[in-house]
Image (tube, grey):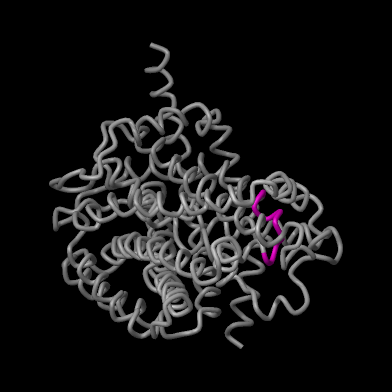
Amino acid sequence: MLMEIVQKINSYLSDYILVFLLIAVGLWFTVKTHFVQIRYLGEGFKRCFGNLSLNGGKHESGMSSFQALATAIAAQVGTGNIVGASGAILTGGPGAIFWMWIIAFFGMATIYAEAVLAQETRVKGKDGEIQGGPVYYITTAFKGALGKFLAGFFAIAIILALGFFGCMVQSNSIGETFSTAFHIPTWIVGVVLVVICAFIFFGGIQRLASVTEKLVPIMAAIFLLGGLVVLVMRAKYIPATIGMIFQYAFQPQAILGGGFGAALKIAISQGAKRGLFSNEAGMGSTPHAHAQANVAHPHEQGVVAMIGVFIDTFVVLTLVALVVISTLYTEGGPLAAGYTGAVTETIGKTNLCQTAFGSAFGTAAGNIFVAVCLFFFAFSTILGWNMFGKINAVYLFGKKNPKLATIIYNVIALGFVFAGTMTKADLVWELSDMFNQLMVIPNAIGLFALTALVVKNVKERDRLVKK
């Protein structure tokens, strides 16, 4: 019964609110910033990789710009790229990927605004740690009771969505894939995961930054290399694969069945919902990481934040989609006729990516490769999401004693991490989706309200460039 209620809420949010709100925010800031995601994309890459170091060192407080980006990408590149993208393709067809791209393009302008505002409104707490994120720019935009309500609503939603339920989703995916690939009992995976996470959680932001700046580039390189090997092996199917993404974006009924309108709604909503879960632009999560960056001007971290969405969606997620579609949906593939019939009993969103890599590498090797990659993806996401939830837990409960609030929050979070490896994920996925989507509403309201502050930062940079 609870599952049905949550699914109905999610369906309403994703079909009638989320799609329009995400696109509206992205379009708004795209226009207001005069396509900042195009004009300053080059600057973003230079700031990210111009002086790349995997050892950014310790800071008195906060992080280096790259450490903040690595922490944001750690949160963005998780099961949303493997399990989430697979679910979008299964439910919405290959065309759902096109709508993910659209969401991501406009989302780059949205996340620029989020990062700029996080920098503009961040504060230093009693414990000396930098605190920043939507609750701080929401209360800047709205003084009094309204600001407190919207910020409190967001804080509760993100703690549940990411800090607790989200980490369950990630640990569940790790447990399932390791069980499939290595036949390790999920409870053993849970114990090991909790021990590692506890060491990092209780080490504070500096320890987390030190881990993510090394982990993210390594995990990305391993996955990209494996994906490129598959695409080389399936090279002759790449044109057809790309064609299917565009064809089924506008003719989804050809593979989903049913009427055109209903199929199109499914394709777009799946692309939007899973796109949000993947790159998190507009959700209000990654601004917590970008607030930590020690930069000279908020614009500098804004353009860096855009690169996070670019890498997440246009590189990692696209690679997943090309591998899945080229191996399973093209001629002779088990899903060439759509996701129907007996195939639904053996292939689901949790094992679709393993099936795709297995068709190229062999079943055992494919399972192992995806299990290892998903461990890195999901583990790094747990680290990022724990930090995001912690900042909001301190906002709600830790004004007098932030250290105690952090300890209590971390203990509860570790319980959810372990529980995720021991339970079925369907309801947890739905609950995580619901609170993810609810986070968007107060975050979007805060972003709209502070448009002038975002535009001011862009104009200041435009003037410097003209000089």
Determine if the magenta segment contains residue 93.
yes
> Does the magenta-highlighted stretch encompass residue 273?
no
Q: Is residue 292 visible?
A: yes
Q: Position of residue 220 (x, y in %)?
A: 41, 51
Question: Is residue 288 something one can see in this rendering?
Answer: no
Magenta residues, dominant SS class: helix
Counting labels gives 0
Q: Nearer the viewer, residue 337 or 163?
A: 337
x and y percent of residue 164 in the render? 38, 73
Tell me which residue sits at (54%, 56%) in the image: 276
For residue 121, above or below residue 396: above
Q: Residue farthest to the top?
A: 467
Of the pair 283 and 59, the residue shown nearer to us = 59
Q: Residue 179's x, y, as percent? A: 44, 80
Q: Residue furthest right?
A: 259
Q: Quadrant of the image for the C terminus?
A: top left
Q: Residue at x 40, y 30 (%)?
A: 457
The range drawn in magenta is 90-98
Q: Quadrant of residue 219?
A: bottom left
Horizontal side, residue 76 vs residue 189: left or right: right
Q: Is 19 situated above or below 105? A: below
Q: Residue at x 56, y 72 (%)?
A: 351
Q: Is 455 on the left-hand or right-hand side of 389? A: right
